[in-house]
Image (cartoon, grey):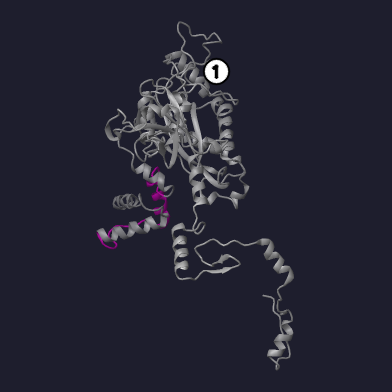
């Protein structure tokens, strides 16, 4: 092989890094054209077709040149030199968060539509334990990421599926003993807790939003963004998503495959799980299967060639390195809500067009807040996008939390999300559903000024498009029964046809 042919081949493959995946024949033709343009026709000896294909396979190995375009770009972005690795030495040191669209359909309970779903997972890097997850229809929002973080540190995650090693804040602080007495010092699952020290996230807006950054700042959690366009920075979570697809998702009736080429026919007609039901299936699988399965990536240097599961790795980590016990607060859930800065008026506060009021606002109505900065003079109102019936306000003097009630919240007997509010608005706001009061009054006054209004038996008779019409159904039905509508008899089409065409002798009927 001429070395110039190999060098030109590498240049051509570099040109196809950002392009769509080519075939080997296209690459070989591009190499020949580039050699002729650079050195002249016939100057560089060309190999035979079979030899060119074999050589191209050897030189393209490891570049994803004829495979996944995303993998090809990821390989091209690799740094030169020794690869580093994020290593965790104890439970809770690094918690990796990631979101991926699942290869299944589910039913959205509000709109009753078949929708795609996204799964957000928080995984401890040292133990590979899944600390929290949330399944959301269509797309993931900052509130969903905060909810996953809340699952990581709250003590009330007692599940029926079992197998979830508890990493969060304990129910009570243990002083002077490591053994709970079973009454006042009970811990969830009889396991100590360790608060996440740092989270590794993508550069998505749901992860780097003010909501998530504010939650981490209030709890003292460090946010470490991963390198852009590098899924290999979170290999443990990426492998979890693959295991989930191969172990659970492909057995569901709504499975649609990893791409459009693998999708079956009419997959949407076979989906019958609600989003909440699908999330519960994933939770049970994580607790009963994933946390109890041996992982090749989990190892202890002191015990070579020994395999461990995430639940065992958590016990080993706590026994070796211990953990930091922190007292829990009953108001910890409010810290994970989204913050909206609003003025407190005499009628309460208004958030996204919804008015909230409560007794906790009485001392601060019409006053400026002591907060400065961008939201100077405004008060922080904490809202939950998954239940807009209530908002929450923290008294700056007593630090007590007060619940604010939506003015129409009494009409609802179950949680009402912000997505449900938007859907209800889209359904109710339609054109030509209501008359224009201003235009109707103008038409009425104009008609009276022109003496166009007739009276019949003391009642005005008007026909105007701007005013609604009322139909007396009983009177209308009575008129129809007394004077039936006569319909023309046009069923004898043969007779009409020969009457219009007297010269025709045969009438043909063709079934197309």
Q: Residues within 10 Å of mark 1 (few under 14, many from 20)?
A: some
Q: Is residue 298 above or below residue 36?
A: above
Taking the magenta stretch, the answer to whether it contains residue 41 is yes
Q: Quadrant of the C terminus?
A: bottom right
Name which quarter of the figure residue 302 lies in. Answer: top left
Q: Which residue is more in the foreground, 339 or 121? A: 339
Above or below 415: residue 64: below
* Residue under pointer 1: 189
Identify the residue shown where x is 37% and y is 46%: 59
Question: Which residues are the magenta region?
Answer: 39-65
Q: Is residue 351 left or right of residue 253?
A: left
Q: Is residue 297 visible from the viewing direction of this image?
A: no
Q: Check the image and report above or below for 376 versus 32.
A: above
Q: Quadrant of residue 27?
A: bottom left
The answer to whether residue 104 is left or right of residue 384 is right
Along the viewing direction, whichever of 294 and 107 lies nearer the viewer? 107
- Judging depth in this view, the residue of 194 and 450 nearest the camera is 450
State the SS at label 1.
helix
Q: Residue at x 30, y 29 (%)?
A: 371
């Amino acid at each position: 092989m001429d070395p110039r042919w190999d060098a030109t081949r590498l240049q051509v493959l570099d040109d196809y890094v950002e392009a769509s995946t080519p075939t080997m024949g296209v690459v070989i033709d591009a190499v020949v054209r580039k050699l002729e343009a650079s050195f002249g026709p016939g100057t560089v000896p060309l190999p035979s077709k079979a030899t060119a294909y074999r050589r191209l396979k050897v030189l393209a190995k490891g570049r994803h040149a004829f495979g996944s375009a995303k993998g090809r770009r990821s390989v091209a972005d690799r740094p030169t030199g020794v690869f580093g690795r994020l290593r965790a030495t104890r439970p809770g040191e690094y918690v990796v968060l990631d979101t991926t669209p699942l290869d299944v359909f589910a039913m959205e309970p509000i709109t009753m539509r078949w929708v795609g779903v996204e799964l957000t997972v928080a995984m401890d890097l040292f133990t590979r334990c899944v600390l929290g997850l949330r399944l959301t229809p269509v797309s993931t929002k900052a509130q969903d990421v905060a909810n996953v973080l809340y699952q990581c540190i709250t003590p009330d995650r007692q599940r029926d599926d079992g197998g979830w090693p508890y990493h969060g804040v304990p129910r009570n602080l243990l002083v002077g003993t490591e053994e709970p007495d079973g009454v006042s010092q009970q811990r969830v699952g009889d396991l100590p807790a360790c608060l996440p020290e740092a989270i590794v996230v993508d550069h998505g807006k749901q992860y780097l939003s003010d909501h998530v950054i504010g939650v981490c700042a209030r709890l003292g959690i460090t946010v470490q963004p991963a390198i852009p366009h590098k899924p290999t920075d979170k290999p443990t979570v990426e492998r979890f998503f693959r295991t989930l697809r191969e172990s659970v998702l492909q057995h569901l009736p709504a499975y649609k495959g990893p791409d459009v080429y693998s999708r079956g026919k009419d997959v949407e007609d076979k989906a019958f799980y609600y989003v909440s039901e699908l999330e519960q299936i994933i939770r049970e699988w994580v607790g009963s299967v994933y946390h109890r399965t041996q992982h090749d990536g989990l190892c202890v240097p002191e015990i070579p060639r020994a395999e461990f599961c995430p639940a065992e790795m958590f016990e080993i980590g706590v026994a070796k390195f211990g953990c930091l016990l922190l007292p829990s607060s009953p108001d910890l859930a409010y810290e994970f809500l989204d913050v909206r800065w609003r003025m407190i008026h005499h009628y309460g506060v208004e958030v996204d067009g919804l008015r909230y009021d409560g007794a906790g606002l009485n001392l601060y109505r019409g006053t400026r807040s002591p907060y400065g900065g961008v939201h100077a003079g405004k008060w922080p109102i904490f809202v939950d996008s998954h239940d807009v019936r209530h908002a929450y306000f923290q008294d700056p003097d007593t630090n007590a939390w007060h619940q604010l009630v939506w003015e129409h919240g009494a009409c609802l007997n179950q949680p009402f999300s912000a997505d449900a509010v938007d859907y209800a608005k889209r359904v109710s706001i339609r054109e030509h559903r209501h008359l224009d009061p201003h235009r109707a009054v103008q038409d009425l006054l104009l008609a009276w000024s022109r003496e166009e209004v007739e009276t019949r038996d003391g009642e005005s008779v008007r026909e105007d498009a701007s005013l609604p019409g009322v139909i007396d159904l009983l009177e209308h039905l009575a008129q129809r029964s007394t004077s039936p509508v006569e319909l023309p008899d046009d069923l004898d089409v043969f007779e009409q046809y020969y009457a219009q065409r007297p010269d025709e002798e045969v009438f043909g009927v063709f079934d197309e």
